[in-house]
Amino acid sequence: MGAAALAAATAAFEGYKLTTRACKKTPPNPFVAAGKPLLVAVEGEDLHAMLRAGIEALGGLDPLARFGNEAIFRGNYVTPQPYPVTTAPEFILAVSAELKRAGMSKTSLFDTHGTRLGAAMQPEHILGRLGVLDKLTQGGVPVLARDFLDPDEFVFVRNPAWPIAKPVAVHRILHEAPIVVSLPVVKRHTYVNFTCALKMHFGSVAMADRMLVHTKDIDGRSGLMEHRLAHFADAVKPQLHIVDARAILARSGPGLGGGAEVVPGVNKIILSGDMVAVDAYCSRLMAQHDKTFTPDMIAPQLRHAVALGLGNADLDAVKVVEIRV
């Protein structure tokens, strides 16, 4: 997209008259054990067996089904590069099968990494190049690809607890969905060091919000990006996070290049209703496979998320169940 087109679209978006709403309200984390948030890490090589074992250890999906019978999936599709840069289609189909096995009538993938303002930037572009669009459609998982510059696609929200007064434009589909299931990958990131459950929600808000953060905090040093990534996650609040850590992207990211290294054979998936605990756990996993990374690098973003009530960063206060199948 050209700079002029982006500037024009951003200006139009900022002038769009919408009422600011409160962030969506979601029930408390339904996946707990003895009063603690529950996190399940499954190690193995058979994806379907791992998912079933993880869901069983989580206590089943009945708590999720109480919110409704349709789920929206959020994946990570920042660039047309395959897993672990992006969420693998086979992973989405496997999760969909387990949700439907538990009684869900429908699952759909939501994504927004394009605009209809440019012929080469269609919202389906990345998904099409990766084969995700065809594979999911054929597998019975509809794909909802939306324009990240269309004001009609968004709802302006704000939590009074945010230290930044400016509201966030979150996609209407995510704001109104009764069930959102997040499917992160585990990656290093150039500016904020790490991408998993929290950072992936840069893809859940308008491009105007994303660009504002990247422009004003281009080197990641002012703290704006770490604050805003927690706010973007707060605007969505998925009820369940299922992380595909069968492989991870180490050393650099969020895409290939710049010294990034794919680490295969990690062979784990992580399930939890607590996005902060997920990032705390997966940051330790990253540290095991990337000597240039330490969990302390993401301590500020976890603190911001904890302050907003998004979860627990202290894994001693989390019921962590690790199993092998």
Image: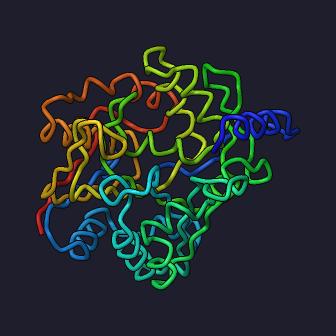
**Foreground residue among 120 and 275:** 120
In this picture, is 16 found above or below 124?
above
Q: Residue at x 39, y 22 (%)?
A: 300
Taking depth in this image into account, of 169 and 69 the one nearest to the observer is 169
* Residue 210 image-quadrant placement: top right
Q: Residue at x 71, y 47 (%)?
A: 149
Percent x, y for residue 163? 61, 19
In the rendered image of this protein, does residue 301 appear above or below residue 248?
above
Which quadrant is home to the N terminus?
Answer: top right
Residue that appears at 26% across and 23% down = 296
Residue 223's place in the image compared with 33, above or below, is above
The location of residue 154, given as percent across then percent down, is 73, 49
Q: Residue at x 71, y 38 (%)?
A: 157
Looking at the image, residue 230 sits to the left or right of residue 150; the answer is: left
| Residue 253 picture quarter | top left
Residue 155 in the figure: left or right of residue 325: right
Residue 79 at x, y percent in the picture: 44, 52
| Left or right: residue 90 compared with residue 260 | right
Quadrant of the rendering where the C terminus is positioned: bottom left
Residue 323 lies, in percent from the top left, at 14, 60
Horizontal relation, residue 216 to residue 318: left or right: right
- Number of numbered discs: 0
Foreground: 37 or 18?
18
